[in-house]
Amino acid sequence: MSELKPRTLISVQKHLRDQVANALRAALIAGDLKPGVIYSAPTLAAEYGVSATPVREAMLDLAREGLVEAVRNKGFRVTELSERDLDEFTEIRSLIEIPTVGRVTRSASREELEALRPVAEEIVAAASTGDLIGYLESDRRFHLDLLALAGNSRLVETVADLRKRSRLYGLTELAEAGALVASAQEHTALLDLMLSGDAAAAEEHMRHHLAHVRTLWAARKQEKATGRNLSKRKLGTR
């Protein structure tokens, strides 16, 4: 019986670390954590009402995703992407995703493509209601599930990593301005083109969609700082 205790503690600790990591991702997306700013684990722990240990572990998880970087004896700095970074991410995604969309259009069954429609509709619904976490999660699922139909797991892993490293920060203002809805609706339009069997049109639409996403990045970077601070909150609250 005594052997079960450490395993239980490890499980609880891992769960708390995951909770903290998800809360920090949400703060990044909302713009509460600012690119270029250094945050200490104790300060964030106080904000979220937990100890510093799960915060440090969560930050290390985010560092592996390229979202933050460790600063010796200070804490973690939120990664700031340059315009060149964004251009390079977009170029790589275009080289992979555009031709893959054409290939999937020609090879996937109608049933496989239709299975993506509920997720495409979730993206639109989340954008319309300002649910940023739901928007990004549904968007991630749609794109990766679509690429998975090509049958190349390494390709999917590569795009998943690119998406993590090019995550949109500070989306609140864009969502409030309705800027995400048009991009969200492009997913259902892409699906309709693929179902029609027009591979060339689907590829062109995908090219437009990625360019639109790049425009959102630019809009986000051009916005003036809002001056908001990380508000006092506990895990489990929104």
Image (spheres, rainbow, N blue to C red):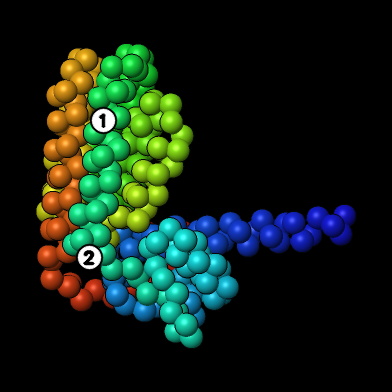
Please state the horizontal and vertical placement of residue 76, each as a whole percent of the image: 42, 75
Q: Secondary structure at mark 2?
A: loop
Out of 237 and 33, give the one closest to the viewer. 33
Compared with 167, 41 (above or below) is below
Out of 11 and 101, give the one closest to the viewer. 101
Say which residue label 1 marks: 99
Residue 96 sits in quarter: top left
Residue 129 seen by the camera: no
Q: Residue furthest right?
A: 1
Identify the image quadrant of the N terminus.
Answer: bottom right
- Kind of residue sitting beneath label 2: Ser
Out of 86 and 216, give the one closest to the viewer. 86
Compared with 41, 111 (above or below) is above
Please state the horizontal and vertical placement of residue 113, each as a whole percent of the image: 32, 20
Query: Residue 82's mark?
Result: 2
Please state the horizontal and vertical placement of residue 230, each as a whole percent of the image: 33, 73
Residue 219 sits in quarter: bottom left
Please state the horizontal and vertical placement of residue 35, each as a whole percent of the image: 29, 70
For label 2, count other residues whose C-alpha is less than 10 Å away and answer few (under 14), some (14-19) or many (20+).
Answer: few
Identify the image quadrant of the C terminus.
Answer: bottom left
Q: Residue at x 50, y 66 (%)?
A: 60
Q: Residue at x 24, y 33 (%)?
A: 98
Q: Is 133 left, or right, of 175 in this rendering? A: right
